[in-house]
Image (cartoon, rainbow, N blue to C red):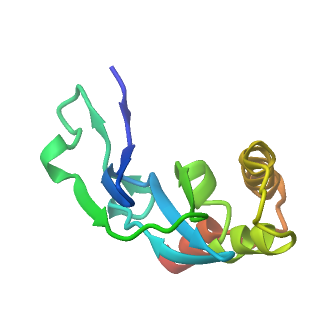
Amino acid sequence: MGSSPACIVTFKDYYLRAINVGNSGFMIFRNSKCVYKSLIQQHGFNYPYQLGNCMTCDKPCSAIVTTVERLLPGDIIVLGTGGLLDNMFTEEIEDIFSKGTLEGVNTEQLASTIPHLALFNSMDKNVDSPFAQATRLAG
């Protein structure tokens, strides 16, 4: 028993195709700026859609299917779960990209830096994260 959000992405001929359920998702960055951010699905605050083998789980047919045309060489796609998206604003990721040149970018370093900052934000009680802002809005 259990449940989980899901985000599956494929690439072919500069097309991105994705299927997403819940609070996982992806963002496309071009020249250090976010040019696309997938939608998340929630039944209510802190109650994301989830796939699983249970009576209250959502079905695969509830997924959002997305096609993004014309990816360009050098575009960076970031996939993340709620652990990333709840703890980092898009602008923070743009900041990481803009601090250095993206030509010859070290993808291993980016793949480490982004989640480490999300983890740091999640533990810092003074960070006004996306989740903290959503909590206030939900009362």
In the rendered structure, the answer to whether residue 91 lies left or right of residue 68 reads: right
Residue reaching furthest to the left: 61
In the rendered structure, the answer to whether residue 89 lies left or right of residue 125 reads: left
In the rendered structure, the answer to whether residue 5 lies left or right of residue 111 reads: left
Q: Position of residue 32 (x, y in %)?
A: 69, 75
Q: Position of residue 26 (x, y in %)?
A: 48, 58
Counting the numbered discs, the total is 0
Q: Position of residue 39 (x, y in %)?
A: 37, 67
Q: Quadrant of residue 69?
A: bottom left
Residue closest to the eye, 41 or 123: 41
Residue found 80% across the figure and 55% down from its top: 117
Q: Is residue 103 visible?
A: yes
Q: Position of residue 110 (x, y in %)?
A: 76, 52
Residue found 71% across the figure and 46% down from its top: 111
Q: Quadrant of residue 55?
A: top left
Q: Quadrant of residue 124?
A: bottom right
Q: Is residue 59 visible?
A: no
Residue found 23% across the figure and 57% down from its top: 65
Residue closest to the eye, 45 or 24: 24
